[in-house]
Amino acid sequence: MGSISENPVEGLALAQEYINRAKTLAQKKKRTILAIAGAPGSGKSTVARLLHEALADISMIVPMDGYHLSNKELERLKRKERKGAPDTFDVWGYKSLIERLKNQQAGEIIYAPEFYRTIEEPIAGSIPIFSDIPLIITEGNYLLLSQGEWKTLSPIFDEKWFVTAPVSDRQQRLVERHHYFGRSIEEAKAWVEQTDEPNAQLIEKNRENTDLVIEWNNPAK
C-alpha cells in the first residue's frame, strides 16, 4: 500500500472549481507541474488523489515522499527519530526528477519512486510517467519551504496550491494513520506531538506565494 492510497477515506469529494482549474492547467501546450503542499495530516495527499481520479486520463501523481531517505541511511545520520523532517529527504534527487519531468521528451518513460508505509521505505522505479501526460501533480510537505535546497523548487512549479486544516483535525488523522500502520495509540500520539507537529508548524509558516489555498475541514464528513 503506497502513499497515494494510504488509509483511504471513502465518500470524499473535491470541489469542481479545483478540478476545473487543474484541467485548465493541463490544456497548456507544454508539460505542467502542479505542486500541492501542506502539513502532515492536512489532506494534501487526498486532494491530489481526488484530483487525479477526476482527471485520470491527463494526469499523474508524483509524491515527494518517494524521496524519504532509507531507514539505514537515517540511522547512519542519526536522524531516524526525526524521520519526516526536511533533512530526512533527498531534496536534490526530488528536484532532479521534477526538472526531468518538466523537460520530458516524446516517447520517454521516467520512473519515480514511491514511499510504502507498510515497510516505511521508498522503492525506486514504482511510478512510470509517460510523456503524453500533460499534467503532473506533485504533493509533499516541503514543496514551498524557503530554506536550504528546498527554496529552489518553487520556480520549477507552474502552479502552487496549499492545503490547510484545523490543528485538531490534522493531529487526529495523524494519530489514526500511525496507529493504522502499527504504532500503539500512545506511540502514535507521542510521534505526532514530538515529530509531526514541529514539522507542521514549520510548513504552515512557509505558505506564502501560493496560487490557491484549500481549507480542508473535516474531510471524513
Image (cartoon, grey):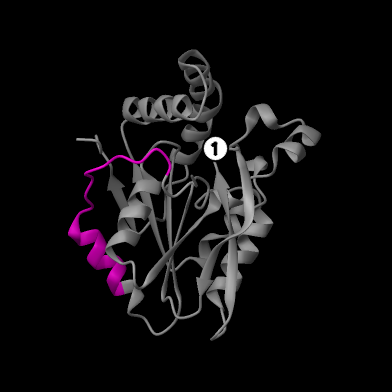
Q: On the rendered structure, is 172 left or right of 116? A: left
Where residue 8 sits: x, y (%)? 35, 41
Q: On the rendered structure, is 5 left or right of 89? A: left
Q: Which residue is more in the foreground, 219 or 129?
A: 129
Q: On the rendered structure, is 171 left or right of 131? A: left
Residue 19 belongs to magenta span:
yes
Which part of the image, by quadrant, shows the C terminus? top left
Residue 180 belongs to magenta span:
no
- The residue where tag 1 is placed is 118
Give the residue type that dot 1 points to: Thr
**Residue reaching furthest right?**
76
Where residue 172 sits: x, y (%)? 36, 25
Q: On the rendered structure, is 44 left or right of 118? A: left
Q: Which residue is more in the foreground, 76 or 107?
A: 107
Residue 26 image-quadrant placement: bottom left
Q: Is residue 85 above or below residue 96?
A: above
* Chain part drawn in magenta: 6-24
Where residue 189 sits: x, y (%)? 47, 18
Q: Secondary structure at mark 1?
A: loop
Number of residue marks: 1
Q: Is residue 149 above or below residue 57?
A: above
Q: Residue at x 51, y 30 (%)?
A: 196
Q: Is residue 57 above or below residue 173?
A: below
